[in-house]
Image (spheres, rainbow, N blue to C red):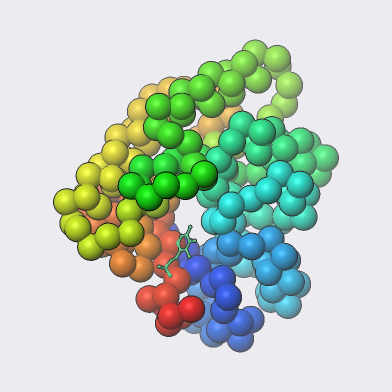
């Protein structure tokens, strides 16, 4: 396959001891879905962990993670992006973000529809035009495929994400540095990696069922 793939160990609902076990084997990238759970665990664990936020993030909670979060995978509205930038500015810290895209068949409120992605990009360009410093850095996209074993459906959705990712690279967004495509979970990571993923988010395969 040839591409480098970062493994994010998804530790939601897993104990500090479970996380430490992987940490001691040298693992540093962990993903959490809930702000409260993340900040409680973070204080009990080594400071050199790269914490990834992968769940739905409410704007009013951004301030709780802004000082330390390594990468937010789940930017799903312009409002959230604006709040991340504001909190980044408060702490003089550039916060790395992925834009979540909705390609799966399941209904969900979260993630941009591929068709509305360009609205977000236009907004980013408007911000750029204001000349203000940016405290968000768009690093790429995150997506979840449908909850299915149908390989053709999965392949198609990963292909769609990969195409959007490639077009994002060509968009020459302000304050962007596009090199992360976060896709693939326990049940579909092999297809995701052969479909161009650079980052997989794996929970149950590493830690057992939740
Ligand atoms: C829980 C979760 C995962 C990990 O799922 P597994 O099937 O346990 O590997 C990955 N991504 C997101 C966004 C999740 O919420």
Q: Residue furthest left?
A: 152
Q: Residue furthest top?
A: 129
For image coordinates 64% across by 36% down, the residue present is: 81
Q: Is residue 115 above or below residue 207?
A: above
Query: Residue 6: horizontal and vertical position, in percent?
Result: 42, 59
Query: Residue 207: horizontal and vertical position, in percent?
Result: 46, 80
Q: Quadrant of residue 28?
A: bottom right
Callout count: 0
Residue 140 visible in rendering: no
On the picture, is 154 further left or further right than 85?
left
Pick the front one: 98 or 102: 102
On the picture, is 43 further left or further right than 75?
right
On the picture, is 168 further left or further right than 153?
right
For image coordinates 57% across by 79% down, the residue present is: 14
Residue 55 visible in rendering: yes
Q: Is residue 32 above or below residue 67?
A: below
Query: Residue 26: horizontal and vertical position, in percent?
Result: 51, 76
Q: Is residue 23 above or below residue 169?
A: below
Q: Residue furthest right?
A: 90
For image coordinates 46% across by 28% down, the residue present is: 117
Pick the front one: 36 or 126: 36
Instruction: Check the picture and name the quadrant holding the N terminus.
Output: bottom left
User: Quadrant location of ligand 1?
Assistant: bottom left
Query: Residue 134: horizontal and vertical position, in percent?
Result: 68, 30
Q: Quadrant of residue 68?
A: bottom right
Pick the front one: 198 or 151: 151
For image coordinates 74% across by 71% down, the residue present is: 40
């Amino acid at each position: 396959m040839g591409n480098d793939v970062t493994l994010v160990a998804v530790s939601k609902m897993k104990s500090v001891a479970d996380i430490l076990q992987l940490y001691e084997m040298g693992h540093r990238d962990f993903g959490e879905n809930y702000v409260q759970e993340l900040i409680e665990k973070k204080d009990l664990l080594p400071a050199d962990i790269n914490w990834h936020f992968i769940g739905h993030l409410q704007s009013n909670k951004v301030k709780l993670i802004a000082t330390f979060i390594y990468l937010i995978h789940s930017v799903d509205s312009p409002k959230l992006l604006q709040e991340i930038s504001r909190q980044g500015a408060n702490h003089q810290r550039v916060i790395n973000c992925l834009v979540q895209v909705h390609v799966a068949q399941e209904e969900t409120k979260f993630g941009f529809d591929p068709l509305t992605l360009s609205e977000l990009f236009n907004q980013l360009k408007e911000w750029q035009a204001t000349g203000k410093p940016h405290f968000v850095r768009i690093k790429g996209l995150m997506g979840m495929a449908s909850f299915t074993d149908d390989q053709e459906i999965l392949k198609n959705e990963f292909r769609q994400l990969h195409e959007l990712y490639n077009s994002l690279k060509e968009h020459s967004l302000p304050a962007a540095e596009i090199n992360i495509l976060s896709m693939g979970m326990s049940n579909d990571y092999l297809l995701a990696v052969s479909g161009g993923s650079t980052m997989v988010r794996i929970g149950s395969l590493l830690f057992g069922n939740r």
